[in-house]
Structure formats: structure tokens, C-alpha cells
Image (cartoon, grey):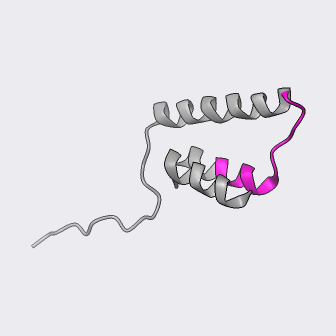
Amino acid sequence: MNATAPSTSPVPAISEAERARRVGEIDFARGSVRYEGGILADDIEQLNARYIAGEIDSDQLTAAILASI
């Protein structure tokens, strides 16, 4: 019997296209904040990086940002 164990990786795989879309989304948001004269805190940038990497989804990103303010 040659069964393959399911992946236990906590990071879901996202496609390069999805990653690129997320980069664009975050860059747009970052630019909007900068246009208003602000900069994103390091903890928000860390959340953004996790979102881009596929570790969290959009709802989780939003919830984490709202919880941090």
C-alpha cells in the first residue's frame, strides 16, 4: 500500500496569478494611505505579507487589521 499522507502545511497554496493580484491590492491600499499622508505600521505590513503569501485570506486580514486598531 502506497498511500500519500495529506499535506499538513499551514500555508495554503495560491497561484502566482492570485499572489500577483494580492500584491496589486496591497500596493493600491498602501498608496492610498500614503496619499492621505500616512504610513502603515510594521504590524500591518507583516499582516499584508502574510496575506500576499496566502497564509491568511482577505476576511482574516481585515479582521486582524481591525483588531489591531
Residue 62 highlighted magenta (yes or no): no
5 left or right of 50?
left
The image shows residue 48 at horizontal and vertical percentages of 66, 47
Q: Residue at x 37, y 68 (%)?
A: 8
> What is the residue that sits farthest to the right in this orientation?
37
Residue 62 at x, y percent in the picture = 59, 49
Is residue 1 depicted above or below 33 in this figure? below
Q: Residue furthest left?
A: 1
Q: Taking the image as drawn, is residue 24 in sight?
A: yes
Residue 65 vs 22, above or below: the answer is below
Residue 56 horizontal side relative to residue 24, left or right? left
Where's the N terminus, which quadrant? Answer: bottom left
Dividing the picture into quadrants, the one containing residue 30 is top right
Magenta span of residues: 36-48
Tell me which residue sits at (61%, 31%) in the image. Answer: 25
Q: Nearer the viewer, residue 26 or 37?
A: 37
Residue 57 shows up from this direction: no
State the residue in front, 12 or 32: 32
Give the residue at the far bottom of this rendering: 1
Is residue 38 covered in magenta? yes
Residue drawn at 43 percent across, 38 percent down = 15
Report the front residue among 1 and 63. Answer: 63
Rendered residue at 71%/59% (across/down)? 68
Figure quadrant of the C terminus:
bottom right
Relative image position of residue 56 (x, y in whole percent): 52, 53
